[in-house]
Image (tube, helix red, strand yellow):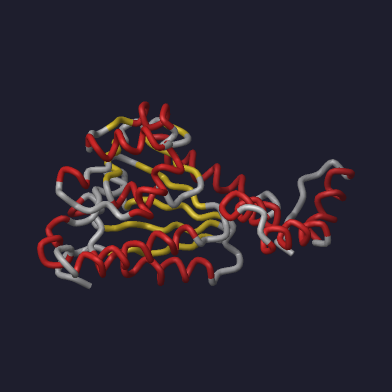
Amino acid sequence: MSSVTGTVRAHINEAVATLVIDNAERRNAMSLAMYAAVPDAVRTIVDTPAVRAVILRGAGDVAFGAGSDISEFRERRTGPAAVIYNEIEERAVRAIEAIAVPVLALIHGPCMGGGAGMALCADIRFAADDATFAVPPAKLGVGYPAPSTARLRAVVGVSRTKDLIFSGRVIDASEALRIGLVDFVVAKDDLDDHVAAYAAQITRNAPLTIAAAKLALNHGDTDATQAAIEACYSSADYAEGINAFGEKRHPRFEGR
């Protein structure tokens, strides 16, 4: 841990895990040590078989994440050290991307720079109506990593990516929704409950089906994807789904 306060922690409540960016004194800005802590926090989640959905959020309701902590840049993101910094940040976001179950980003307030980069790793992004977004490396002279650029491009397209990076401008939640940077905008006071209800809805559905769909969407028609799809048809959950439909009741899926 650096001299900058903050942590990234995992909390598990039955079938829903929450990955929390917690550095409230700096609007949940990410220090290098916090990036380094992400893979272990994610491992806690993926090593818990009961988890069927993950909520990614900033601590509190003031900010999702104000970005990477710039106070560290002179020492830890200058010259050759920048390569190491970027590698640690990339390992963090790849750990989130590799989570097999759905990841929902819950975004209050500022979601900037590195914070936006983490939110882009979620499958679905929910923003409060006070949320704001920016990708500001051009305002600092930062060399924006190619994987980060590619994630943004995959979500909003080439022209919008150029706009956001070239200008470094801040956009509000309504524009973020319009360009596809977020998927839903919810009244601030309702956001936490809304995302909790959405996550609960996911946990009631067939986890093998969802995992196979996420593989297909993220990796295409690979052997692993095809195996996951085929496994659904011989699963106990498939039999349960058909039986529940015939008996006019809600299915009870167990992920096997």
From the viewer's perspective, is residue 82 above or below residue 184? Answer: below
Find residue 155 and report its image quarter: top left
Residue 98 or 140: which is nearer the viewer? 140
**Residue at 47%, 41% in the rendered image:** 193
Which quadrant holds the N terminus?
Answer: bottom left
Residue 140 in percent (x, y) is at 15, 48
Q: Is residue 140 above or below residue 39?
A: above
Instruction: Give the residue drawn at x 54%, y 43%.
Output: 197
The residue at 51%/48% (across/down) is: 123
Whether residue 168 is situated above or below residue 40 in the rendered picture: above
Is residue 188 at all visible to an observer of this figure?
no
**Residue at image coords 47%, 58%:** 97
Q: Position of residue 12 (x, y in %)?
A: 49, 62
The spot of residue 126 in percent (x, y) is: 44, 39
Residue 182 in the image: above or below residue 220: above
> In this orientation, does residue 28 appear?
yes
Which residue occupies the foreground of this view, 228 or 51? 228
- Quadrant location, the C terminus: bottom right
Relative to residue 154, is residue 4 drawn left or right?
left
In the displayed image of the protein, which residue is found farthest to the right?
A: 246
